Image (tube, rainbow, N blue to C red):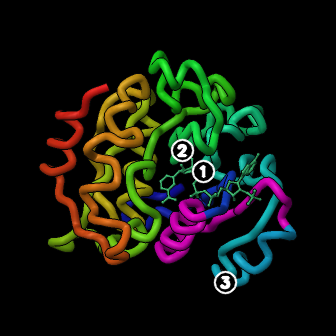
Amino acid sequence: MEGPENMTTTVGFIGSGNIGTAVARLAIEAGHQVVLSNSRGPQTLADTVAELGPRASAATNGEAAAAGDIVVVTVPVHAFPDLPAAPLAGKTVIDTCNYGPERDGHIPELDNKSLTSSELLLRYVPGALLVKAFNNIFFKHLVSLARPAGAADRSWLPIAGDSAPAKAVVTAFLESIGYCVVDAGPLAGSWRQATGTPVWGTPYGPYSNESGLPVGEDAIRSALAVATR
Ligand SMILES: NC(=O)c1ccc[n+]([C@@H]2O[C@H](COP(=O)([O-])OP(=O)(O)OC[C@H]3O[C@@H](n4cnc5c(N)ncnc54)[C@H](OP(=O)(O)O)[C@@H]3O)[C@@H](O)[C@H]2O)c1
């Protein structure tokens, strides 16, 4: 990986749905390579890869995990037990995932708030250097609010994680694809950006407005500060 100004990296994706393909699109626009995977196999991603162009390819989960300098895990929480732990060990892994019992079934540690969903994920990929990011923004807003560095209306996103080097890598990646970053603390505190918190969705505007509303640093810091668990 090169320096932040001209960082070119390979980003692996485990999960290539709404948010995975939105991040992949921005990554490609920024000059990165992407390797996509899903639950049904690489052949089912042919149309997506064709649309994304020559810097995109499809692979199995394990291959995408192995290929990425950064790997984005962007699946329903109920799929955590299926993730390939070995190739993620030691890697910077972005966790976009949100818990929703109506989709994921009830998970007692998440219902009773003894764990954040990122801490639960870490149990399944124990060697990964996890950084929570993108979980608080609607995928259409993520695409439409990306702005070049220095733009007055560039938006900010929170990240949470326990590894300072991994956070630095993720910060450089987010900056390369159009965002500024607020460090929201460790994984144990990532409930501050979880589903339903003030920083989740709302600051970037209603889903009905696909353009979204640019959000500055102060608004993100304030929303994180007033979150309650
Ligand atoms: N939608 C949003 O705007 C948004 C924003 C922020 C965060 N999130 C969170 O990010 C995660 C992904 O959301 P999404 O909206 O992108 O979901 P989605 O559109 O339903 O896509 C989910 C992806 O995960 C894949 N997947 C499911 N089980 C898998 C497994 N065992 N192994 C590998 N891949 C698997 C699916 O593959 P198949 O299609 O082959 O099953 C699909 O590519 C969720 O936790 C969600 O809560 C969503």
- Depth check: give the residue in front, 60 or 100: 100
Q: Position of residue 187 (x, y in %)?
A: 43, 28
Q: Position of residue 87 (x, y in %)?
A: 75, 38
Disc 2, SS = loop
Quadrant of the image for the N terminus?
Answer: bottom right
In this figure, which residue is indicated by the disc labeled 3? 51
Question: Ligand 1 near label 2 (Cβ, under 8 Å)?
Answer: yes
* Amino acid type, label 3: Glu
Q: Which residues are magenta?
A: 18-42
Tell whether 62 sits left or right of 99.
Answer: right
Circle 3 Cα neighbour tier, 10 Å, few/some/many (<14 / 14–19 / ≥20): few
Residue at 69% from the left image edge and 81% from the top image edge: 54
* Amino acid type, label 2: Cys
Which label belongs to residue 147? none
Query: Which quarter of the picture shows residue 224?
Result: top left
Q: Is 22 placed above or below 114 here?
A: below
* Amino acid type, label 1: Thr
User: Between tags 2 and 3, which lies in front?
Assistant: 2
Tell whether 69 sits left or right of 221.
Answer: right
Question: Ligand 1 near label 1 (Cβ, under 8 Å)?
Answer: yes
Residue at 60% from the left image edge and 50% from the top image edge: 74
Query: Which quarter of the picture shows residue 198?
Result: top left
